[in-house]
Amino acid sequence: MTSSKNISIRNLKLWYKDAQALHDVDLEIAHNKVTSFIGPSGCGKSTLLRCLNRMNDRIPHCRIEGDILLDDKNIYDADIDVVQLRARVGMVFQKPNPFTKTIYENIAYAPRIHGIMSDGPKMDELIEKSLTRAGLWKEVKDKLQEPGTALSGGQQQRLCIARTIAVKPEIILMDEPCSALDPIATAKIEELIDELKKEFTIIIVTHSMQQAARVSDNTAFFYMGKLIEFGETRDIFTKPKEQQTEDYITGRFG
């Protein structure tokens, strides 16, 4: 895994048809830290997250201006291989989405198609390592040939995290990864995030301010498609500089 520099987002604007969803976003995302995006529904936080691995490419009439630099290279340049980009910038979705395959095949699939590894003892080792890092190995080591969809919701989400880290990304995007989970499963995912940031840069969109306060080093607050404030999480939650941030955090709106 190469050492990634910060992600630099510069003067980013985005439109869906004629509706502007992001306005002049400038943001530096630090390596090996957890950065959370918070703000009310429809404020642009998930839209921005999806820009970071070009998931918005799939949306008709979506137009982007500005730069997102990874290792000083704009990920929207014409010569960027989007498949390779998505191997470097993995994504975990709101609802666990394991493939309708065995637990083993869920993890083995991506390393195979990316040409990282073929079947054999090394693949077995990768499966075990990925599941171990996702905190799931002990629970599933005797069930590897059973379907991933048979696991509980929290286990399915950890399986999806294991699947993401199997291709050795540098960055993991998480779009409200706990919103479909119960408090116990949520606590396990949060512990896992804390563990994974030793190796990965993590960006999480969350509706839960308590979760942002617990898991993230830095927090960005968005409102109406604009980045209102960005800083260390403890500062954002205890001494925000902007009145809008304070109003949102104290529950006056949102």
Image (cartoon, grey):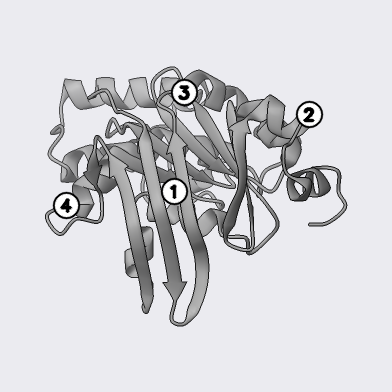
- Whole-Å distance between the Cαs marked 2 and 1? 38 Å
- Whole-Å distance between the Cαs marked 3 and 2? 26 Å
Give the residue at mark 1: 98
Q: Amino acid at mark 1?
A: Pro
Q: Secondary structure at mark 1?
A: loop
User: Does the rendering let one see residue 245?
Assistant: yes
Residue 76: quadrant of the picture: bottom left
Q: Which of the two residues, 102 or 187, is positioned nearer the viewer here?
A: 187
At horizontal 21% and vertical 27% (from top left) the residue drawn is 123
For discs 3 and 4, the disc positioned in front in the rendered view: 4
Label disc, if present, on residue 85 of the rendered structure: none
- Whole-Å distance between the Cαs marked 1 and 3? 20 Å
Do labels 2 and 1 touch, CB within 8 Å? no
Mark 4 or mark 1, which has the lower sequence index?
Answer: 4
Q: Amino acid at mark 3?
A: Leu
For discs 1 and 3, the disc positioned in front in the rendered view: 3
Mark 2 or mark 1, which has the lower sequence index?
Answer: 1
Q: Residue furthest bottom?
A: 18
Count numbered badges in the picture: 4
> Residue 198, how many percent across, how many down?
44, 17
Mark 3 or mark 4, which has the lower sequence index?
Answer: 4
For discs 2 and 1, the disc positioned in front in the rendered view: 2
Label disc, if present, on residue 238 of the rendered structure: 2
Q: Secondary structure at mark 2?
A: helix
Q: Quick check: 204 left or right of 124?
A: right
